[in-house]
Image (cartoon, rainbow, N blue to C red):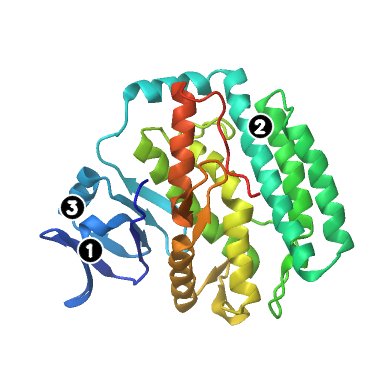
Amino acid sequence: MKKLLNTLYITRQKSYLHKERETIVIKEGDNKLGQFPAISISNILCFGQVSVSPFLMGFCGEQGIGLAFYSEYGKFLARVQGKQTGNVLLRRAQYRWADDDGKSVSIARLMVAAKITNARSVLMREIRNHGENTLLSDAVSRLAVSLRRAEHAQSVGEAMGIEGDAASTYFGVFNELLRGSGFAFGGRVRRPPTDPVNALLSYVYMLITHECSSALQGVGLDPYVGFLHQDRPGRVSLALDLLEEFRSPWADRFVLTLINRKQIQLDDFITEASGAVRLNDDARKTLLTAWQERKQVEIMHPYLEEKIAFGLLPHCQAMLLARHIRGDTEYYPPYRVK
């Protein structure tokens, strides 16, 4: 099993990263902020005004260390990528599958079904822990109908339509899950998020999308060519496909934990003149620290039937998807919470 390595989240503005022997050094001016052995690092995510030496960029590409740049608010900007890994025959098979409606929908409907299953699990968990709730129970019933429809979707378009309906049902009752003082959720708003809950969801989805993209590259798949999400220049469609399985059980539950345990407060957010809402620097560090801790938690993988760190889920699912595309398995087993 792949070893879970560390991810460096660089949020200090005007910091500078360079390579020193076999280590990665982080500096601000003449002050050294940190130094880490490169062998323990799998990804470096840079937010805002962060500079990286050309030599370190080349080293990351050579060693397969993911290096990506985002705006200070989490918008993806660029990725440094070295030589493509994996067998070229696997990627050729992936492209052929993406052009085949039948093969695409065979994977797409499984991913959508897994997303709906996991969303139902989050709502049913809330009912078990806090008692009967009519709104949640009704949503669980509607999601069960969506799940049956998804399992028999005949086209990618139909699967996407079912996914949209299920997401509307799920987020329509998401406010019932919030117990943090003052937090409210009136619906999903993406670009830009205009309230604290949406800001948290978008930020965490972005983190998992990067994990999925790196995992897919690691097994030799092209993260830009998906089966559920259609091709669009600059969009990591296959990574977004994989993200669907992790939204409710990983991202949403993590956000709910931050809010309901009051690790994040309403005064941790800044509202821009445009109306966009974002975390302030201190709160972002709190989130990222909790995020790293969450990635270390061990779970039982429902298909592999072995304990893995939460942070290895994208790598496991990428491996299982690659096996299916190569023809080693009859079906792709998406991640479903039991």
Q: CA distance from mark 3 to mark 2?
A: 42 Å
Whether tag 3 and tag 1 are in contact, CB under 8 A, the answer is no
Residue 299 at x, y = what percent? 52, 56
In this orientation, which residue lies closer to the viewer: 239 or 151? 151
Amino acid identity at mark 1? Leu
Q: Mark on residue 54?
A: 3
Looking at marks 3 and 2 on the same chain, the residue that comes earlier in the sequence is marked by: 3
Q: Quadrant of residue 272?
A: bottom right
In this orientation, which residue lies closer to the viewer: 128 or 57? 128
Residue 199 at x, y = what percent? 59, 64
Residue at point 62%, 45% (across, down): 336
Q: Mark on residue 33?
A: none
Q: Secondary structure at mark 2?
A: helix
Q: Residues within 10 Å of mark 1 (few under 14, many from 20)?
A: many
Q: Secondary structure at mark 1?
A: strand
Q: Residues within 10 Å of mark 3 (few under 14, many from 20)?
A: few
Residue at point 50%, 25% (across, down): 329
Residue 36 at x, y = what percent? 22, 66
Q: Which residue is mark 2?
A: 109
Q: Would residue 189 be found to the left or right of residue 48 on screen? A: right
Looking at marks 3 and 1 on the same chain, the residue that comes earlier in the sequence is marked by: 1
Q: CA distance from mark 3 to mark 1?
A: 10 Å
Q: Which residue is mark 1?
A: 17
Q: Secondary structure at mark 3?
A: helix
In this orientation, which residue lies closer to the viewer: 220 or 172? 220
